[in-house]
Image (tube, rainbow, N blue to C red):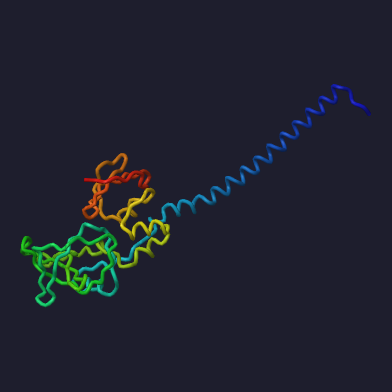
Amino acid sequence: MPFDAETRKRLQLFLLLAILVAGGRAAWVIYDRYQSRKEAEQPTQQVALKADYYVTPKKLHPYDLKSARELTKQPVWVKVGYYHAYFPYDSRRRKTDFAHEAGLLLPLQKLMITDVVTDVAPEAKGIRQILATFVLDGRTFAATIGSDQAGDVKIYSDDIFFIEDPHELYKHWPAAVWKAIDNREVQPGMSELQTTCAIGVGQLQNSDPRTLHYPNGGKPLIVTFRNDKATEIKPGT
């Protein structure tokens, strides 16, 4: 039966509305599934971004010479480079030459601690320095890791050394980042922790944006971080 013009117009309008409703429903289903998938993935992304927060380096918690000598049972790696001084050490006389600083421990420098000893520095009489000894290029050196003042023993080797390979602790870092760290270089995109591992301790110059001055063993750099990523790297003075 033929339809008049008015009826055909109404049918066309009805069909158009039906198509729009069906299309809208399909779009909503797709959007809802996308949002659900996005929400499911978000925790994984956050964990990946904050993976460093979940790294818990092993600590020895030494409280005397005997417990501190646990440092000799595995290699150690320097946590903060260009900060801790070391001095020549005479193993036969068990004396440290505090008058002649031999250098500063390097970023992530790997050492084998041979012993933990005590000695008195001329400028700190009455306080026995607790020192970790190690060998470099055939010579023995010592670095202070604590003190003993009238029986009040404080050992902070956990703040100075990793006792696990940082390459394993932070194995989630990209290979390119580790290559830069091993070459003691800092590159754009590196975090503040990665930069410290590469070029040692930094001194805060500005908080907004966060800018640090790194002595870098005599080759100073100024690094600016935004959202914990190095965005500007330039020579310092």
Residue extending farthest bottom? 92
Residue 190: percent from left, percent from top: 37, 51
Q: Quadrant of residue 27?
A: top right
In front of the other: 91 or 138? 138
* Numbered-mark total: 0
The quadrant of the picture occupied by the C terminus is top left
Give left or right: position of 186 versus 136.
right
Q: Quadrant of the N terminus?
A: top right
- Above or below, 152 against 214 in this view is below
- Give the percent coordinates (x, y) of residue 176: 41, 57
Which image quadrant is residue 117 in? bottom left
Q: Residue 14: percent from the left, percent from the top? A: 78, 30
Q: Residue 85 at x, y = what percent?
A: 17, 61
Task: Please state which of residues 110 and 79 is positioned toward the viewer in this rendering.
Answer: 110
Give the residue furthest to the right.
1
Q: Is residue 29 left or right of residue 61?
A: right
Q: Residue at x 17, y 68 (%)?
A: 142
**In the image: residue 176, left or right of residue 142:** right
For this view, does 170 lie left or right of residue 160? right
